[in-house]
Image (cartoon, helix red, strand yellow):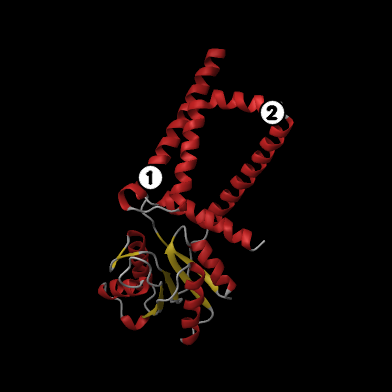
Amino acid sequence: MDRWYMAIFHVIYGLFTLCGSVFFLWFCWPAVFKGVFNTGNLCGMLLSVLMVLYGIRYRQIHQLIRTLWHRQIARVCLLAAAVLAFIGIVCVFAASVSMIRAASKNVPDNTPAIVLGCSVIGTRPSRILQERIDAAYVYLKEHPKAVCILSGGKGEGEDISEAECMYRELKKAGIDDSRLYLEDTSVNTQQNMEHAHEILEEIGCTDAVTIISSEFHLYRARQWAKALGYENYGYAAHTDWRYLPTFFLREVIAVCYLWVRHI
């Protein structure tokens, strides 16, 4: 029976090691092949390494914990670490659920839209931005009377603003430019919403708005829209699976930070 237990434990920790290795490569991919390096894949790679180390060295780790448990100060530190880890897991779970639920199933016809920008490579949209442009195109075709605010300033390494890039691509795709309004001064999500709000007020659209962005980004954007008094909806652009863990984890961190700021 003991041998069966040991075999089961070997399989469990072997899977733990395998999962950690797969996630490490998944988080590495955007950094190695596309130069995308942010808090998402940095934290993801770190957690993946810890998973692998635990899967390989679980016996030594368990023995170390048992040894430290008999020392009072170390026991307090272990308990504090366990509490912090539990709080962290709960926050990550809550943020993930909130982000997943942020896309709206039913958007009222011809609701004005705000498309949130992402990085531009020279004058071309990055993959994430192209996904948002594609979603905006579909939305504007589905809602032929809706106007659209294209929001995003010009960052380092960008030859044109994110708003201008989206404008060019949508116009090229056949969207009437009279429906498109550029907001090209914002540098973060809060400014995206606040500056777009000013344009919407100027054109008399003050009741409801649809946020068009990556699925992982909609929750935080909708919170800012809610703070501005809008009835708001989320229209998701679908992220390439190779990038999703990196950007999703980064956004989880951003959502948790947003919650902490408002406690």
State whether residue 29 appears in this view.
yes
Q: Quadrant of residue 170?
A: bottom left
Q: Which residue is drawn at 55% across and 18% down?
A: 5
Of label 1 and label 2, which has the lower sequence position? 1
The residue tagged with tag 2: helix, strand or loop?
helix
Q: Is residue 1 visible?
A: no
Quadrant the N terminus occupies? top right
Out of 68 and 200, give the one closest to the viewer.
68
Q: Which residue is drawn at 64% across and 46% down?
A: 87
Q: Name the residue under label 2.
A: 69
Position of 238 with respect to 11 (left or right) is left
Q: Where is residue 221 in the image (x, y as percent from the top left)?
A: 51, 66
Dividing the image into 4 quarters, which one contains the C terminus?
bottom right
Q: Is residue 57 left or right of residue 240?
A: right
Given this view, does label 1 or label 2 mark the residue nearer the observer? 2
**Looking at the image, residue 9 lies above or below residue 259:** above
Q: In which quarter of the image is residue 262?
A: bottom right
Q: What residue type is labelled 1?
A: Cys
Mark drawn on residue 28: 1
How many C-alpha atoms fall within 10 Å of the one at disc 2: few (<14), some, or many (≥20)? some
Check contact, mark 1 vs mark 2: CB within 8 A.
Answer: no
